[in-house]
Image: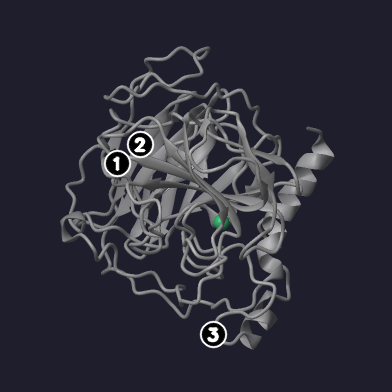
Amino acid sequence: MNWSTINNRTFLSALLPLLIMLGLLLGSGCSRPPQLAAVPAQIARNEASATPTVLLPTAVPSHTATPTATASQTPASTETQTAVAPPPTLTAYATMIPTTEPTATPGPEVEPTPQSTPSAWPTVNPAWLVRPPAELDLSRTHLWFARPVDGNNNPSAPYRFGMTYNQQLSPHRGVDIANDLGTPVVAVGAGTVFYADEDIETLFGPKPDFYGRVVVVEMADKWEGHTIYTLYGHLESVSVTAGQPVNAGDVVGMVGNSGVALGPHLHFEVRQDDPHSYESVRNPELWYQPYAGRGVLAGRLIDGNGVFLPGMRVNLDCSDGTPRTVETYWDQYTAPDDILVENFVISDLPMGTCRVWAETPGGLVQQSIEILPGELSGVVLQLRP
Ligand SMILES: [Zn+2]
């Protein structure tokens, strides 16, 4: 992959959703928690048990699953964070937009539901509302899977899992990975094809023809007793049939823009237990391996009572000097991992120390965290009770 290819793809990844602002709503303000004094909270990370030359994570899950990926991809030189600025016409678009479902050239995933105000999170499981500000349990992490494209594998930075593309799209249920039409999409691990067709009558999203041609793979390995599915959406064509066994790297289809997508990209999801439920998604960046030499960070941004702060920007200053941001999950429909109970994840971080900080209504919270190659680190950012 050369520089121009990377940059073109990066540009495409950032620009595509902006081209399709129809039906999208701008936020009108956010309900915020009470003013609280900031204080650093506990920091938790896994121990440096792996040598830098080991690509597979040493935090092997507690069950019988074995990593199937090799993390052979190299990181792109230009990350998608660098090209997120919206065009100047954005506001004009937004004021023209009706609140109804779009009728033409919809974006990557445009739902007919307003979403731009963070909701009290979560509302579905009160037990999650108050979590002790304990260390994250990193002992049963994932990072099993390979990357899903034989091509660019950088997820769109402003539209990571649970994010809203600067309050212009519904909270994202997966990651978007821009590539040229026809780029091979590959299974991220061993499994059996559960579905491979258009989602016209069999639904996986909020409405028919949402993902277009879609492949769903039931993964061979279970996690904590749960069945895990991976979903590959908006394909130009499918290369497999239901019931067919696949292994990591097997081509399951080609990158396309079928369904609710304007430009060619792969929408990749991880689902737990219910392959059809749009609400069974989990953050894919917890599941596929980072690029060689890179690590993954999962975290919680919570108030003094342990309640998640939704839709808040988290900033990272890492060893390579590239500024990064990620936002906490905006609503309860992008569920956290059962064990981590995180509300943000960002992958492919350079090894070394990252300062992680957020300006919240209750003040600045920050932590330093060590990123280890091929491993998951965790951080808790909590306001003073
Ligand atoms: Zn998507």
Closer to the camera: disc 2 or disc 1? 1
Q: Depth check: give the residue in front, 233 or 345.
A: 233
Residue 18: mark: none
Residue 318 in view = no
Tell me the residue at 36%/54% (across/down): 280
List the residue tagged with mark 2. 378
Q: The residue tagged with tag 2: helix, strand or loop?
A: strand
Position of 277 relative to 350 (above/below): below
In the image, residue 275 lies at what x, y percent?
A: 40, 51
Q: Earlier in the sequence, mark 3 or mark 1?
A: 3
Q: Earlier in the sequence, mark 2 or mark 1?
A: 1
Alpha carbon separation for disc pair 2 and 1? 9 Å
List the residue tagged with mark 3. 100
Alpha carbon separation for disc pair 3 and 1? 36 Å
Q: Quadrant of the C terminus?
A: bottom left
List the residue tagged with mark 1. 340
In the image, residue 279 lies at what x, y percent?
A: 37, 59
Tell me the residue at 76%/41% (across/down): 6
**Around disc 1, counting alpha carbons within 10 Å, would you say few (fewer than 14), some (14 to 19), or many (20 or more)?**
some
Closer to the camera: disc 3 or disc 2? 3
Q: Is residue 26 left or right of residue 61?
A: right
